[in-house]
Amino acid sequence: MNRPSVDGPVNATSRNPVPRETAQPFRGPSSPRGLLRLSLPILVVGIMALLPAGVLAGSPGAGNAGLASVHSIGSAPAAQGSHQGLSGLAGSGAHSAPSSLRPARLGWSDIQVAFVVETTAYDGVYDSGAGDSGRDPCASSGSLVCEEANGVPVIAARAGQIAQAIASAHPGSNVSFAMADFFASIDAFDDGDGSAFHVDVQNFTAAGGLQSAVNHSFRTVVLGSGYVYGDSDLSDNILHSPSITALYGALATNGFNWSTSTHHVVVLIGSTAPRAPGYTVNYTVSASDYSTFCGKSCLSPTCEPSYAFSVGSSPNCEGWTTSQTSNATQSIAWLAQHGGRCASSLGGNCTLDTISLYNGVTDPLSKQWPTGRTGGGPNGTLVRANVAHILNASCDLAAATGGSWAGPNFFTCPNGQKGNLSFVSIGSTSSPNTTNPSLFAALTSIGVGAPVPSHSGFNQPGDLLITDQFNNRVIEVNPLTKQIVWSFGTGNASRCNPGPGAVIAPNDAERLAGGLTLIAGTGTSACPDNRVIVVNSGGSVIWQYGSAGVAGNSSGLLNVPVFAIQLPNHDILIVDQGNNRVIEVTLSHRIVHSYGPTTGPGALNAPNSAEQLANGDLLIADENNNRVIEVNATGHVVWKYGHGLHIVAFASRLSNGDTLIADSGNNRIVEINATHQVVFHYSTNLSGASNAQPNPTCVVELRGGDLLITDQFNDRVFVLDPNRHIVYQYGTTNVVGSGFDQLNAPYSAAVIGDYTGVTLPPSVFR
């Protein structure tokens, strides 16, 4: 399996060094607690998002050469004729992952899929006879609007084929379908016609009956038995839309007849920005009629007005990925993850996929962007900002809800996911082109989530083992139900009671043979722990090194232990951070090896993890020296890497010789090859809900090639597939808690039964 990569070293932005946790929980970018490690993995959770099947080259613009996504303030504009500089993360190239196969995908017994389809002019429904051609140079000459895509015609004409393809991709599931459309913002940029939310197919129907249902409703009622939305022109909103209202209608009202015995999937298809902070678009440089007289009020609104549905109303200013009010429940992302209708579906949440159509509005090089305005015209600075806000909105929503995303093939989401859609023109409204291979592939490859096997309880392969740092506990979680099936520690962030049955601020845990658990009791400056312990399933300590609450470097004492593993010879390897050493301790408590020179090139500065490699060397994350080193049995540094790293939390050596690093101070994961080239990187702080400084503390590669990432101050653990989809998450992003699906600065995570990339413990403890 391959991960998108980058060519050459990446120069990370330098920040002031961040000390290991020195006080009890102060959250914020200036307070990373210690940094850390993650253990083993295997996600027998078959939760890999379906990926679009084909990516076709080609574009309508003046030479779309591999582009990226996200407008950078202050960056120089790209040269005319090439898509460059619109990217959250650069990325191209390949990474060789282990060849072991992923577990077979598991399916839901029943799936309901609701398409929520936008119908603005550039989506393929422009009414050229309405008389409002705005400033679009093509429409002004009597033609259709420039770069009008065939998105809506494809859906209208091929809904049945799309549904059949989706159903065929899930042969073990009963899949049914519904549909709604939307477009009218009914604000200062809209002349008032059209609907903010219109249900076309309310009752979910099997794939074989969907085309007939769409023909009877959407084609006949909305498109006038053709492919034109009457009076949809450039006196209507074209850069923003009521997508929040439409999704609220789909997720939280009786618009669709959802069943509690199915998994719910909502697919948003469109090409505009929501009315939410961070996604404003500027109509000054648009082809809209309103661009000529909106004056200083040309920015789209950031508040979605309350909307009265047939039953109930949406809140005023409902949020996109996060709430705009003090009520955290008022966002589309929250509804998809926790709302009543979604919580009652199979899996306990809704899958929310987004597809950004490739058309004149989402192409910064399109001729539809009229010239003559500052920052306007093809590739203008304001144009590029508009496009970035539109596309990033759909990226962010998919990322926040764990859904899939598809968009223009020149664009890359902030999380590194690359677009896969090619432009296909509508041709004509009377007889439109309804063939669009890349859009068809994206529609038929939507993510539907996937369950994991149920099991009897403790110590099951595929369960997550998480050090829930500031909840003072280690937990084992069933990833299907997200229920905690085993826990050690109080789970109380305010307790300071290191000793039997308790652990303070654990930074690492590993499941050993016989259901035993090895835990590093790291502690805090206000409440030290200073123990490495092994506990059984009943919570009894059966082995311990260190003394509760006592710091020291003499025999039997530790000072801020942050990491521990059991070696194949049964000894325990401990990273004793406060003593700047890595020690090997026998089960009879004798130190047989210690690495920690006080001077010279091998001197450590707050080491944070250590793995034993196949050749017997130690791979050490030398945290505050901002490097990773490999040390041989004689204590010599035989390999090192530190270029651009800042606060190195964890490192492991992959089977292909690459080194995977949690570059915590730079809020990213990096992979480097044997020649010190960065071949992959992923930032964890780019989604809308993210903490600015999440300081990820652990990353390991799983058996199938996915990555398990512990995103400390985003209070989550998630699985990233090779194409940068988040396919599973435990913990609510940047929300501290100890309740259901909540964590408090998790420091490490493992999937029980998979030791890919990390040291394999012996088959028996003693």
Image (cartoon, rainbow, N blue to C red):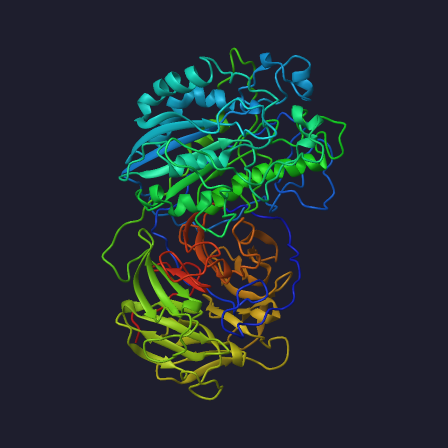
* Residue at the limit of the structure toward the bottom, as seen here: 554
Say whether residue 370 is left or right of residue 673.
right
Looking at the picture, tell me which residue is in the foreground, 251 or 511.
251
Position of 466 relative to 530 (above/below): above
Q: Quadrant of residue 29?
A: bottom right
Q: Quadrant of the C terminus?
A: bottom left
x 51%, y 42%: residue: 317
* Residue at the limit of the structure toward the left, as seen here: 456
Position of 227 relative to 739 (above/below): above
Residue 462 coordinates in the image, percent (x, y)? 33, 55
Residue 574 coordinates in the image, percent (x, y)? 45, 76
Residue 326 coordinates in the image, percent (x, y)? 49, 52
Camera sees residue 53: no
Say whether residue 685 is left or right of residue 752.
right
x 60%, y 48%: residue: 6
Residue 677 coordinates in the image, percent (x, y)? 61, 55
Position of 587 relative to 685 (above/below): below
Looking at the picture, tell me which residue is in the foreground, 288 or 19.
288
Camera sees residue 47: yes
x 31%, y 78%: residue: 541
Q: How many numbered marks does the figure carry?
A: 0
